[in-house]
Image: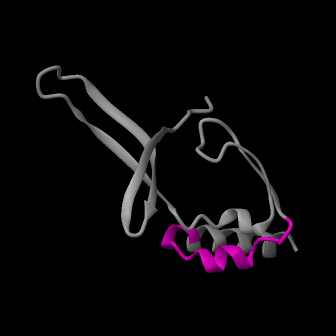
Amino acid sequence: MAEANVEALRRGYEALNRGDLSVVLELIDRDIEWHEPSPSPDAGAHTGRDSFERDDRLIAVVHQSGRGRASRVQVDARLAHVWTVKDGRAIRWEAVAHVDDA
């Protein structure tokens, strides 16, 4: 049973990485309870599989790295870009910084 659970979770994350939300939703119970910490744009407690569907929000996880031309300051950051899209046009954008648990 434990191996089946691990395999289901693996399939879910693989589907999520492909952007295949239909597979992810098949693996989630209709009455799931889930929690998002700050600074997530969805921070708080949520209930139900339908709360996973965000038709107007797109999230891109990005890794920015480089060095400033003039300042020579090194930049290395992981961010989530949260786009709200309406009628095919972006109407809101928010960058959420990765918070290191260490």
Please tell me which residue is depicted at 41% across the width and 47% down the height of the picture. 93
* Stretch in magenta: 16-31
- Compared across the picture, whether 84 is left or right of 72 comes to right
Q: Nearer the viewer, residue 81 or 78?
A: 81
Check the image and report above or below for 97 versus 72.
below
Check the image and report above or below for 24 versus 97.
below
**From the image, which quarter does the N terminus lie in?**
bottom right
Q: Position of residue 46 (x, y in %)?
A: 78, 53
Q: Nearer the viewer, residue 77 or 37?
A: 37
Residue 19 magenta-highlighted: yes
- Compared across the picture, whether 28 is left or right of 21 comes to right
Q: Position of residue 73 (x, y in %)?
A: 24, 23
Q: Residue furthest front?
A: 87
Please tell me which residue is depicted at 52% across the width and 63% down the height of the picture. 56
**From the image, which quarter does the C terminus lie in?**
top right
Check the image and report above or below for 47 versus 41.
below
Q: Nearer the viewer, residue 80 or 85?
A: 85
- Compared across the picture, whether 93 is left or right of 46 comes to left
Asked where in the image residue 77 lies, by quadrant, the reply is top left
Residue 86 magenta-highlighted: no
Give the total number of marks visible in the rendering: 0
Q: Nearer the viewer, residue 82 or 2?
A: 82
Please tell me which residue is depicted at 51% across the width and 72% down the height of the picture. 19
- Compared across the picture, whether 36 is left or right of 89 comes to right
Q: Position of residue 78 (x, y in %)?
A: 43, 41
Q: Which colour scheme appears in the figure? A: one colour
Please tell me which residue is depicted at 71% across the width and 68% down the height of the picture. 9
Q: Residue furthest top?
A: 71
Q: Position of residue 97 (x, y in %)?
A: 48, 37
